[in-house]
Image: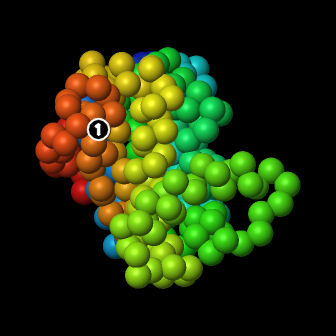
Amino acid sequence: MRKARLLLVITFILSILAIPVWASGPSVGLSADEALELLRLGNSRFVNGTPQHPYQNQERRTLTASEGQKPLAVVLACSDSRVPVEVIFDRGIGDIFVVRVAGNVAGVDEIGSIEYAGDHLGAPLLVVLGHSKCGAVTAVAENAPLHGSMPALGDKIKPAVEKAAKDNPGLSGEALVGPAIKDNVWQAMEDLFHQSQIIRDRVKAGQLKVVGALYDIESGKVEWLGPHPAQDQLLGIAPPGAKPKGGPKKVKPKGEKS
């Protein structure tokens, strides 16, 4: 009886000691490339119908409530209900710091939230995520009437629509939406770099990687666009006209199964 009781006590102590290691998950101490690969793998599982639903249990809730959050990535995404960020990346509680706004634009509130996630929480990766059939971009591209506070939101998207129209002179209306959605991702990234010294400094210091991505709401696949083509110029560390660097490398994260 005494041996059985001792065994139970030892098992209980070991289980308590194991919780922080197991429940802390992959978000602690990851590089930006490792965090990006976790998102890639998660999206692949989501598309293939084999999600793992990691870190969605009581241990994870207890750990993040007591020790705080250490997200592996920040995602600036659209508010569209068809773009559930944690679901499409098959991640769990405390994994992703999500900032959502119609049209995935980067205004003062969004930038402040992203700065908090990077400067205070130490997230190594920022993803600006656009998506197919975006209603906000479509409204601006098709000159739909906007009322209330929506015109101010539309103003953040207009530069992307104008650039898409300039680069695709034969397109207009619905046909222009696809290129405009992609340009809107680049526009949000430009706004982030132009308006946030904190983000610029963290990228320059190698503490943050900023990449663009596009989510297809029908297939579920995320297309990775990589860093902004003019990132070095936007950061002021390369002259205008310099060739952009390539996209991020694939790195297999430690301890993560595909």
> Residue 211 is drawn in which quadrant?
top left
Which residue: 27% across, 18% down?
205
Asked whether, in this view, residue 82 is left or right of residue 171, the answer is right
Residue on which disc 1 sits: 231
Give percent across and percent down for residue 249.
15, 46
Q: Nearer the viewer, residue 189 or 34?
A: 189
Q: Determine the secondary structure under disc 1.
A: helix
Which residue: 20% across, 30% down?
238
Q: Residues within 10 Å of mark 1 (few under 14, many from 20)?
A: many
| Residue 148 visible somewhere in the drawing | yes
Asked whether, in this view, residue 250 is left or right of residue 164, the answer is left
Q: Is residue 145 above or below residue 234?
A: below
Give percent across and percent down for residue 170.
41, 81
Number of numbered discs visible in the structure rendering: 1
Give percent across and percent down for residue 157.
57, 55
> Residue 125 is drawn in which quadrant?
top left
Give percent across and percent down for residue 23.
43, 33
Which residue: 63% across, 66% down?
140
Q: Nearer the viewer, residue 117 or 51?
A: 117
Q: Is residue 207 above or below residue 58?
A: above
